[in-house]
Amino acid sequence: MPNVLAAIGRFSARHRFIIIAAWVLIFAVFTGITATSANMNGSTGGMPATDASKALTTMQEKFPAMSSSPGAKTLQLVIETHGSAKATDAATKAAIESVLTKAEALPNVKSVSDPFNVQRPYISKDGTTVVSTLEFSGITDDNASETYQEVVGFAQGQGSQFTTEVGGSIAKDSYAAFGPGEAAGILIAFLVLLITFGSLVAAGANMLVAIAGVATGTIGVVAWSAIHPIDSTTITLPSMLGLAVGIDYSLFILTRFRAELKAGRKVDDAVSRATGTAGTAVVFAGLTVIIALVGLWVTDIGAIQDMGLAGAFAVVVAVLMSLTLLPVLMKSLGLKALSRKDRKKLLDGQVEETELTRRSFVGGWSKAVTRRPLPMLLGAVAVLAILAVPFFSMKTAANIPGGSSPDSTQRHAYNLIVDKFGGVQSPLMVLAEGGNISGQVKTIQNELTGLDHVNAVIPGAVDQAGDTALVTVIPAGGPIDEGTKALVQDIRDHASSISGVHLEVTGETAIGLDTTALMTQALVKYVAVIVILSFLLMMVMFRSLLVPLFATVGYLLSLGAAFGALTAVFQWGWLKGIIQAPQGDPMMSLLPIILVGVLFGLAMDYQVFLVSRIREEYVGGRSPKEAIMTGFRKSGPVLIAAALIMGFVFGGFASSTMTFAAETAFGLLVGVLADAFLVRMIIMPALLSLAGHRAWWIPRWLDKILPNLDTEGHALGDADEDTHEEHVLVNT
């Protein structure tokens, strides 16, 4: 592989116009498709095939009127009295009716329902709360938000006699695709590159390749929507991930290019050798991320599959950019990729200190870990374990009812209705199937009424065939309450308790429970797939059994830390003044499976970056501890810079006001920093030190059948030795 990649790098450097033209053409084609045919109106992936979704399909077939979408836009005014006052008291009733009369004059209001209507009253049992429905006409995307804000302002200005909240929504949530937080993250990442390289043009080249890659990858994903519609949130993952890995992959190759220049190689030789050696590590690192993301296909959930494929495509583009466009820039920069100080040393023929004699922070770190591996190992594991503690309180939900923010008037209205009226906003729909079902409806109603956590049971229609009845069950709580979840299970447990009748339950809560259970099952299968495939990949690369095992265990530790921090911040509400996204809700149930995949890929990135250099030194004849220290000193600064860059990029996205984007970015932020600084820079070298030569052991029979990919680039050393010596003589 190194020879192939070296040839690609050399070709790209020698045919710069062709490479640039090819990428410009690809970007232009993607842009043209996006401008004319993009479809971001939702994924075509179907609902998971669960009991609740099958029941929903049956309900829609038997009762087609239930599946028709309402044409009117509505909001609810939820009015709660204070103290001992009742809504039915003469004075209070008159004040409420006055408010509702004023509401009729609000923009685009078509009608306002009367909660005191004797035929259809909407008054709580304790008499303190009423609900009035506002129906609108003429609502468009242009005026929906303004109209909603007018209603909220009207509700907040109704004095202190009662509390008025606005339930529901008529406007779509809008989020900035790229805000000041993301821009700040990129700027800080650029400063890290500048400090790392000591060269403005080198840092600029690195960032340019990354930005070109994320732009091409993201626009490519949007173009894909022309043939496979996707949801607007799908591009969140490829955007943040494409940018982060694009910077890191270019950083790794560019660092090796600079090292080859410092060693006295010609520019063309340095380009090909950097692409062949560091490029091999980049390809393997990229493959682990791609495997992890493509592996999301096993979930059989359309939205997750789309997000996984989109993220994988962004990583593919980032890898290809680093192997083709970056060599173009490296050739163009030449010795300018080095700092002025390094260029002067090179022209003066000065030889740098060896990695073992040079004193540095990273060198001191590596010595401390290798001299006291066990205490360092235990300390790092203890820190990660503490960070993971909140994970055991983590809750997930397929959907959060009442809007995205727990502090909004929409959520307050939703919760108030649940408290006073039960789960009328998210009823359970029970299908009763059997012969002569109309004669069994009363028995079914009595059976369901006797279950716990039931507020009311409302018998509904019977289909034309007379074999299916629809019964509405109003739970006592909301759709994500534990009592409502227990009620769904109780109904299923009583599915055949009535002779000749079979019950099926559907609705928001039932579908959400089934979806969460499906994701949990898929997560187990998914983890098994990516761990096995990546273990095999690393076994081929490192020709070891213990190294892939160490890598996997370290990943699990960093994953636990990420989930623990997520729970503490987004569920418990820590950092509320810093994180802009809403906090206090359970995590979205699709978040764990996304984070498991992405963090696994990124963790293996750092594993490849660090251990590939350590193995190169070990194969070159150094003792295990010398190989660790030398490889650590060579790759450590790059690893630190790469982790900081990813951290700042993800930190920028964590400032998003969109909950899912902020949760994903924050989880990746904590996971990446924990994995880089605790797992890869402490736990991994400590384990390698303790294992010694055994870390690189592999059975002879297995070593013979595994392909030899020459990841250390020995063939490259033989190929360009003559040109290297000639160039050294010329420069000295």
Image (spheres, rainbow, N blue to C red):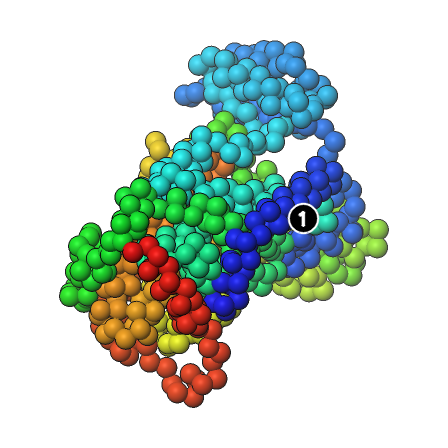
Kindly identify the amino acid type of the residue bearing the numbered disc 1.
Trp
Kindly give the residue lying farthest to the bottom in the view shown. 701
Q: Classify residue 131 by image quadrant.
A: top right
- Residue, x 19% and y 65% (percent of image)? 370
Q: Quadrant of residue 426?
A: top right
Classify mark 1: helix, strand or loop: helix
Residue 187 or residue 256, whichever sits in front: 256
Q: Position of residue 720 (x, y in %)?
A: 43, 67
**Quadrant housing residue 654:** top left
Please indicate, yes or no, whether residue 258 appears anywhere in the rendered image.
Answer: yes
Q: Nearer the viewer, residue 293 or 480?
A: 293
Choose between 140 and 373: the one closer to the eye: 373
Above or below, 78 relative to 460: above
Q: Which residue is mark 1?
A: 224
Observer-nearest of 402 and 320: 320
Q: Residue at x 78, y 51 (%)?
A: 62
Identify the residue shown where x is 69% and y is 57%. Answer: 54
